[in-house]
Amino acid sequence: LFSSLTPVPYDEAYNVKADFDADVHPNKVNLGIGVYRDNDGKAWALPSVELTRRQSEIILLQKAIPSLPNNHDYIPAGGLPQFVMAAQKLLFGSLYSDIRCRLASVQTISGSGACHLGTSFLAKTLKPRSVWISDPSWINHSLIWEVTAPDVQLKFYPYFDAGSKSIDFSGMNLALESRAEKGDVVLLQACAHNPTGCDPTHEQWKQLADLCEKKGLIPFFDIAYQGFASGVPDEDAWSVRHFAERKSMDIVIAQSFSKNFGLYGQRVGALHILASEASVVSAIVSNLVRLIRSEYSSPASWGCRIVAKVLEDPDLREKWLRDLKQMNHRIKFVRQALFEELQKLGTPRTWEHLIRHIGMFSYTGLRPEEVKRLKHEYHIHMFSSGRASVAGLNTHNIIRVAKSIDIVVRD
Ligand code: PMP
């Protein structure tokens, strides 16, 4: 039956992880997948989240609080209401009470599921001609649109200037201004851009909002790193809130809790559609729920309770805000330390971008053949584009990583 099926390549994230797992070197370094790691290279279980999990499990065992489940019942297809509201408030902050009547939100299978559901919804309802994706972007963005909405044409706007290793804002603006058409979707990462580590400034976000408004483009935000850019979730949602304040646009937002809660495998996320008019909200929600029912019926029920609890409880929320700051500080520290080591070694090329870049990733400028040597000769794993997930750096490996980079760029 399947004899004509040809194998398709696994994506690079899959391959980098597989190569890292297969590498038996005791001092291998993981600069591949975007997972925040502690100074010992372990995926960090945030203390605020762990405390909540443990407390919830004890309460659950004692069956002391009726609102917590003492069984494994389904949650509603659109998600756990307390979680959905907590997700909305985290995203919109003080703007929430003004916009809530225009907001259609559902729980999703993390950020990937939110991107997928949003794509599927737009493809079925608005049938856009094209979607504009940053070049480069998170590799799954193109794949999700390609597989979910094959009739929508993928187009790419320039995003990264390889010379200055900064955002190519004029290239981005020019491409969208001159080539995007009314009704096209524009995929935007709200903060801590994956893979480049470069974000637009507030002024540039304003220009992008003007452009979307003027041309009738549909902004589709992906916010997977709220708290990772500045350390403060309210600041990192600035772009989304600015677009929301305009009131003139319908905007789509895919929200992930994988990174900022360290709940990667729990698959916690939400999709929000902020409509320009309140009257359409119930129709949007019912259509989203229909898609959910056809795909996985209802979302996972445990991680969302942890997120809701942390965000609703003032003490836990304070602890979580401190955890975010701690991750942010460590990332800045390892960026600075790698930069200083390369300076000490007098490594050719410039490396200031390592400290200028924002969030978990840097486009290092390392070339594919150099990345290959780093893997084969020095057991340092990253993407062939030179993207490094800097959270994999720590005080035990920075000197070795710097020395290895120094060798491969000199040869
Ligand atoms: N968007 C971006 C830009 C990402 O980097 C990621 C994770 N790598 C996601 C969305 C989704 O992650 P998850 O499905 O784990 O929430």
Image (cartoon, helix red, strand yellow):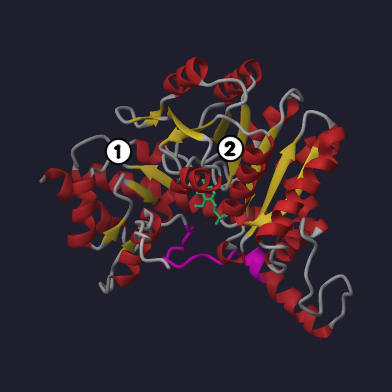
Against 215, is 45 above or below?
A: below
* Residue type at tag 1: Trp
Residue tagged 2 = 190
x, y percent for residue 390? 40, 51
Q: Residue at x 24, y 51 (%)?
A: 371
The front one of 405 and 208 is 208
Question: Image check: 130 left or right of 339?
Answer: right
Residue 351's disc number: 1
State yes or no: residue 38 in magenta. yes
Residue 159's disc number: none
For the residues labelled 1 and 2, the Cα–Cα distance comes to 25 Å
SS of the residue at dot 1?
loop
The front one of 66 and 152 is 152
| First of labels 1, 2 by sequence position | 2
State yes or no: residue 191 in magenta. no
x, y percent for residue 10? 37, 58
Q: Residue furthest bottom?
A: 62
Crowding at mark 2 (Cα within 10 Å: few <14, some 14-19, many 20+): many
Q: Quadrant of residue 29?
A: bottom left
Q: Residue at x 76, y 46 (%)?
A: 287
Q: Quadrant of residue 215?
A: top right
Most prominent secondary structure in the magenta stretch? loop
Question: Image check: 407 left or right of 361?
Answer: left
Question: Image check: 318 left or right of 29?
Answer: right
x, y percent for residue 328? 53, 49
* Residue type at tag 2: Ala
Against 181, is 231 above or below?
A: below
Q: Residue at x 50, y 48 (%)?
A: 147
Against 26, is 167 above or below?
A: above
Some atom of ligand 1 lies within 8 Å of the CB belonging to the residue at label 1: no
- Residues drawn in magenta: 35-50
x, y percent for residue 75? 78, 66
